[in-house]
Amino acid sequence: MSQDVLSRDFPQSDAAKRSTTTGDRADAAAFELAEHSIFAPRHDFKHALWPRSRYTGRDFRNASGTTRSRESSVFPLSRMDRQVQRIVLFFQRPVVAGFGVRAFEVVAKLALYLLTARILGVAEAGLFFLCLTWSSWFSTFGRMGIDRALTRHMGAELGLSQGATARRTLLAGVGRVTVTGLVLGIATGLGGTTLAHIVFGDPALAPALVHTSIAVAGMSVTFTLTAALAGTGRTTWAQFLQNAFWPALTVLAVIAGARDAASLVTWMGVAIWFSGGVAGLIFFCDRTRFRHDATLSAGEPAPGSAGHMPPLMTTAWPLMVVELVQATIVSVPVLLLGVMADAADVGAFSVALRISMLVWMVLVSLGTVASPRFAALHRKGDLDSLGHLNRQIQLIGTVTGGFVCLAMIVLPETLLAILSPDFTTAAVPLMILGAGQAINALYTGQDVLLAMTGNGGTLQRLNLAQLVVVLLLSVSFIPLIGASGAALATAIATAQGGLGAAMVAASLLPAARPFAALPLPATLRHLLALNRQPSTT
């Protein structure tokens, strides 16, 4: 690639210019291709989003006292032709790596569901899924919204190279979650027997629910660490540790000999804690990024300006409601079904619900990749780039999620039979859940956009409306039509969340308006207490 072509197509950053002056023009070209790829970081934010990634094949920072660039241990791009460079850079994009992790997660979780159903049996699998649902829902209280708040704060602070501030925020947030998570875990262990007998009316659930205490505390701490990790730009590691690694380790436990719900829940909790330990180790190895605050230039937000970040808990409290509602939407129908139906029905519906959540996994992956960029672009005031990124996320989520939803609607029995023929009774619920997720996929990332741009309060009110809907529908439909009623309540609330977030995002952030956003009625604008001006906080 000639220097003239490179300069015309891609205006060079300082790092690329320095590389070009040393004669490494192929590496300069690779660097610029990486910077202009989809979701690729730009200029001063690139190290915050892809720290130490070596995605150009070389380290452009010369060693002290030398003029020679240090070769990457991964591959020397200067020896590749342009086509190979483009292929390599494509697979190093965060969104592609994120999809790779999600593919691994899908395989690991499907293997877990398959082995659990076939080895433990439908009834014992139902007990396991009840415990998994309880740990996911109860640990949300332990995180108190701090996990999503840390994603925003870490991304915004590191976007301006405020490493010391990010470190203080991280320690304060993780410390609070650790205390509350341990308290809730102990409460689950002490009250598990009572819950099993009085609430669920199933004494066989008691041993597994007591052992769920390990997972409750582990999810609280681990998910907070991985959310902070996403804010630092390590989105691939964050998704892997939060969603894929511990299910894979739990599969190994099944293969190794876990034959009842209590044993499997115990190993799951240990696996979750191990994933948190790996996340902590990554932060320790990356500690040099958090030692100092860089001096802000005249054009960047300074403390006391409109771009100053609010206290962590100010961001976290509204997001806690958001997290609780999202957990409730997928948890309360299962828990209510557990009270009103037997373990086999709960197991079948839980499998259908978790198949439908494969779409949600893809959407969360896209949101996780984009969340630090959302936060940084908004804080810098680059609303045009924010809108461009938002619509990219939405388009990819619509296409990828739409195909999965279509398979759930058209081939529900086939998908369920892959796990176990006993689960085909949940075919109708799976079709209903797929329809709800299809609408949610159409508006991918809009809740993340609101959370990362300081509109947590508005998102909180949207989610409270979802909570009211899912509770009313669950109480009304589950006693009448069982699993199909649980699916209907979940699907309507899920679709409501995506549609409502898109309408509000279009109203508050016109420059970042998503595709196909419906107009927000004046009545809803009043109920949500929206300002007529775009959000700037």
Image (spheres, rainbow, N blue to C red):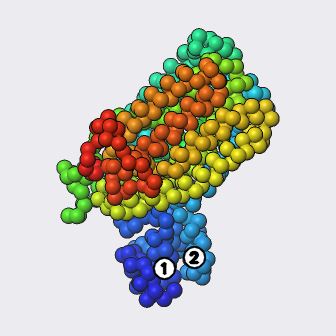
Residue type marked 1: Ala
Q: Residue at x 72, y 41 (%)?
A: 412
In the rendered image, residue 312, in percent from the top left (x then y), is placed at 32, 40
Left/right placement of residue 358 relative to residue 28 reads right
Whether residue 147 can be seen here: yes
Q: Are marks 2 and 1 in contact (CB under 8 Å)?
A: yes
Image vertical order of residue 118 relative to residue 82, above or below: above
Report which quarter residue 20 is drawn in. bottom left
| Camera-nearest residue between 493 and 268 | 493
Instruction: Please give the name of the residue rendered at 25% of the width and 50% of the height, measured from the top-left corner.
Output: 533
Left of 177 or right of it: where is 113? right
Residue where numbered disc 2 is placed: 85
* Distance from the alpha carbon under mark 2 to that under mark 1: 9 Å
Identify whether 139 is placed above or below 75. Answer: above
Q: Does the rendering let one see residue 368?
A: no
> Image quadrant of residue 295?
bottom left
- Mark 2 residue element: helix
Query: How would you rate the neighbour count of disc 2 (Cα within 10 Å): few for under 14, some for 14-19, many for 20 or more?
Result: many
Q: Amino acid at mark 2?
A: Gln
Q: Which residue is at a point 24% across and 57% down the rendered structure image?
A: 301
Q: Please provide percent x and percent y for residue 399.
A: 58, 56
Mark positioned earlier in the residue sequence (2 or 1):
1
Q: Residue at x 64, y 53 (%)?
A: 403
Residue 240, image x, y percentages = 58, 49
Q: Percent from the top left, x then y, of residue 222?
A: 51, 39
Residue 29 image label: 1
Within 10 Å of disc 1 (Cα), the crowding (few <14, some 14-19, many 20+) is: many
Assign a secondary structure to mark 1.
Answer: helix
